[in-house]
Amino acid sequence: MSFKFPLVLVVAALSLSACKPVEPPAPPAPPAAPAAPAAAPAPVAPAAKPEKPSLKLETFDGKTFDLAEHRGRWVVVNFWATWCTPCLKEIPDLDAFDKTRADVDIIGLAYEEIERADMEAFLKEHPMSYPMAIIDTYNPPADFDTPRGLPMTYLIAPDGKVAKQFLGPTTSEELAKMIEKAAQTTATP
């Protein structure tokens, strides 16, 4: 028996000496670096909006509204939508303002995708005496900022310059104060 024990040790030693430590597999080669992209063009700053914006479009009733033809008068350019609750509250107020102020013209710009029949139904429930146009949301008037929210209103001075931009609801009272303030500024030497 003493002979077997050492033989077992010898066999075990030989078996272990034949085993080599297993090396872990080599990590996968990193992917080849992509070719360097062509130099990206420098970001282009948005074009500055003109001091005197232009706006010429066909209104819902088939007429043409041209902002340039309203020089010498105050113009309220009101972006709105039928689904916008604050916009719906503005419509009667703006309508009354338009009817009572001979020196002010208003244009409503419906900033939404809506079928003509749906707009006709809306206008029966929410009449407005001032002109209105449906604006293509993918191609809004270039001289005005794309609305970030509705309503969005511009007060255009008689000289054609933007006197004030309102993001959110405004009232005829606020518009009247702006007009009065501007009139006092220009009347003061």
Image (tube, grey):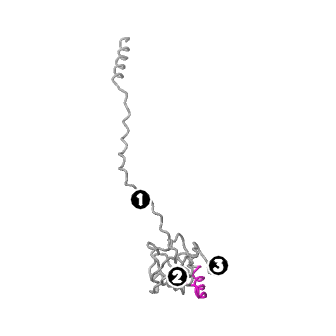
Kindly identify which numbered label has been placed on residue 41. Answer: 1
Q: Is residue 64 above or below residue 138?
A: below
Q: Quadrant of the C terminus?
A: bottom right
Q: Residue 23 sits in which quadrant?
A: top left
Tell me the crowding category of disc 2: few under 14, some 14 to 19, or many 20 or more residues within 10 angstroms, Cα based. Answer: many
Residue range corresponding to the magenta coloring? 89-105
- Which x, y percent locates residue 28? 36, 40
- The residue beneath circle 3 is 185
Quadrant assignment for the N terminus: top left
Residue type of the residue flagged with mark 1:
Pro
Q: Which residue is mark 2?
A: 107
Q: Nearer the viewer, mark 3 or mark 1?
A: 3
**Disc number lying in front (3 or 2):** 3
Q: How many marks?
A: 3
Q: Secondary structure at mark 1?
A: loop
Q: Is residue 44 above or below residue 137?
A: above
Q: Who comes first in sequence, dot 3 or dot 2?
A: 2
Q: Please identify the quarter of the rendering in which residue 181 is found.
A: bottom right
Select label 2 or label 1 by which is in front. Answer: 1
Measuring from the top left, give residue 82's x and y in whole percent. 52, 78
Distance between the Cα atoms at labels 2 and 1? Answer: 39 Å
Residue at 35% from the left image edge and 15% from the top image edge = 7
25 sits to left or right of 65: left
Marks 3 and 2: CB-CB under 8 Å? Answer: no
Q: Which amino acid, mark 3?
A: Thr
Asked which secondary structure carries label 2, the reply is strand
